Amino acid sequence: MTFAQPKMTARDVSVFYGPKQAVKSVTIDVPTDEVTAFIGPSGCGKSTFLRTLNRMNDTIPAARVEGQIALDGEDIYSAGMDVVQLRARVGMVFQKPNPFPKSIFENVAYGPRIHGLARHKSDLEAIVQRSLKRAGLWDEVKDRLSDSGTALSGGQQQRLCIARAIAVDPEVILMDEPCSALDPIATARIEELIAELRGNYAIVIVTHNMQQAARVSQRTAFFHLGQLVEYDATDTIFTAPKEARTKDYITGRYG
Amino acid sequence: MSSTLVAGAPAIGAEPAARAPTDWRTDAMRGRIRRRYAAERRFRLLGLAAVTLSCGFLLVLLASMLSSGLGGFQRTDVRLSIDFPALNLPVTRGQLRGSGADLALAGAGLQGAVGRAAVQAFGEGGDRYIADRAWLTVRDAVLADPGLLTRRTAIDVPASSGIDAAARGAGRADDEAVVARLEGLRLLSTAINWDFFTRADATDPGAVGIWGALKGSLLTMAVTLLVAFPVGVLSAIYLEEYAGRNRWTDLIEVSINNLAAVPSIIFGLLGLAVFLNTLHLPRSAPLVGGLTLALMIMPVIVIAGRNAIKAVPPSIRDAAFGIGASRIQVVFHHVLPLALPGILTGTIIGMARALGETAPLLMIGMRAFIASPPGGLADPATVLPVQIFLWSDEVSRGFVEKTSAAIIVLLAFLLAMNAAAIYLRNKFETRW
């Protein structure tokens, strides 16, 4: 499935961990201003594929990526692409909340500071405030910005991580099962937040939870055994999947 | 299907027997529980015994060091009556003002005069009761109060090593008799031997000081820390964060692990060959000693550093990379602060080992008799453990206490160094 104006495009992308192939020739377009969900059983390669979109696999020495991935038409694996800038443009939120063991303020300010986005302290403070507000965390932490980020609850930590990601003003946000370590109430907060952020960013979310995919996403891609089986509008995937494997997975036959 | 997964399950197809309720009150059950508690009690007792034993050893060590060593910080003084007008020193009051005063007194023959005064005061052989350097005490008293030269006075001067030993009950019989006589006259007293903290090695056990060796140790440790810490930490960072895993890095890892176990005297030979014979650095100098010990403890710091860096959760690295931090930013902003407590622990262990090390320093000439404290990194020096080794080898009885006193100083140094490192470590300790 392709769009007229995709934010990111992947063509024939394969990922190998040593001799093992984790992702097999995936071709997909990620739309601008919409939420795309990757679903599929454990070990199907959806997280691995997600991590190729901002080259986080570079940090794993054994990982090798083939094929072409482009952000706004620009090949992100080309020699001219700076990985540091790429990761600022394509932010990431991880499965387990991973705030830095620093203050809440420092957690959010770190990205803008290393990328030189704030000229003055007041600019930085404005960015931190705006990011925390967007992440829906400002009211809870505005009086204790100097407290440690690790002292927050799990759900708050994850929203702090989202604030940290959006503080550098990314174009794409990748979320790797962002709610799998959270309780249902915190999960609902994150899902609301994703709905609010939609429209400003291209969001790609990997999830195990099919209801979550149905709730938050407009597009859903189903991965199985490293292959992209089906990619369509979320409504279509959940009501009238074309592939038998998709149907089996959604109806709970396996996974 | 599920029954085959249960260990010891009956053969496929056979019906499992109906489950009978467990009887928890049978004798076998009670016996088993009793034995479990008994095993736990035995283990606790064994642990307690082990801890008591090690604490006991520590207490015995400390008690024996303190009981035999505290005397090393004291000296025996003899009250010496001096009739200055009778000695008729050729020195004028004018000469006693200004900077040349000590020279004037030395030139006037004060040393001989003090000896004569001792003979006068204690009879034939009385000059042997006081230390050779006793006249320095007299000199200082005169410098402090030139008016003394016009009258008869009594000054407490250090006793000779023989009298000092006899006063502690460890001298020769004739000295013991002298001590008994002097004590009868109430002329003996004990004072804190401040000279011990300001002087260096000497042949007379009464005149030795620990400052030379202490300063040597301080300088050597400074060199060791300044070389081993940065090099060790940077190696650990490089190996953990930058170097890939291949045959070469495996080889380096094995080599470092083996280096950490190499006997220290081998490092002394290495230091001798490299620093003295090849680079021609000064012999017996803290610079060379520090470099040699740095080579010795570097593997310890590298290993501890690598383990500490490995223990930093990958999620922190992911978080920093995911926001666009470069590798060096990830390392210095996030990994290193979290790994620092572990790195410091390794450094403490390494430095403590270096501080107590004797063998490698013997190889590079730090066992020489050095009678003045080192002025700098290139001056001949010795260090505390070597000084202890040298003094323990002396025949003179007076060195026994000095050896124990030096051990107390070494232990105090060690405790101070560790306390500083632990303070730093706790300061940097952060949870995640």
Image (tube, grey):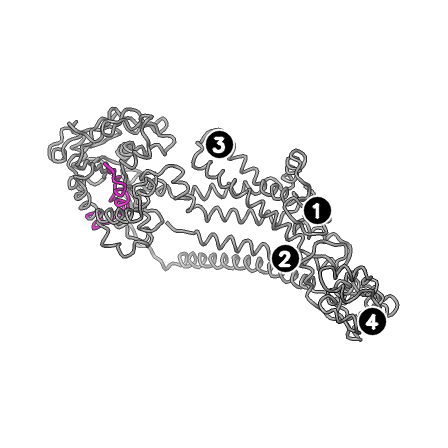
Crowding near pointer 2: few (<14 within 10 Å), some, many (20+)? some
Q: In this view, does B207 lie above or below A248?
A: below
Mark 1–mark 2 distance (CA, rounded to whole Å): 18 Å
Q: Which of marks 4 and 3 is in front?
A: 4
Nearest-to-viewer mark from 4 and 2: 4
Q: Name the residue under label 1.
A: B367
Magenta segment boundaries in residue numbering:
A160-188
Marks 3 and 2 share the same chain:
yes
Q: Mark 4 points at which residue?
A: B85
The residue shown at (71%, 62%) is B98
Q: Can residue A81 be seen in this view?
A: yes
Q: Quadrant of residue B90?
A: bottom right
Residue A28 appears at what percent x and percent y?
21, 28
> If you read the primary sequence from the N terminus, does the residue marked by circle 4 or circle 3 appear first?
4
Task: State how far apart marks 3 and 1 are (Cα).
Answer: 38 Å
Quickly name the residue at label 2. Answer: B409
Can you identify the residue that label 3 sits on?
Answer: B249
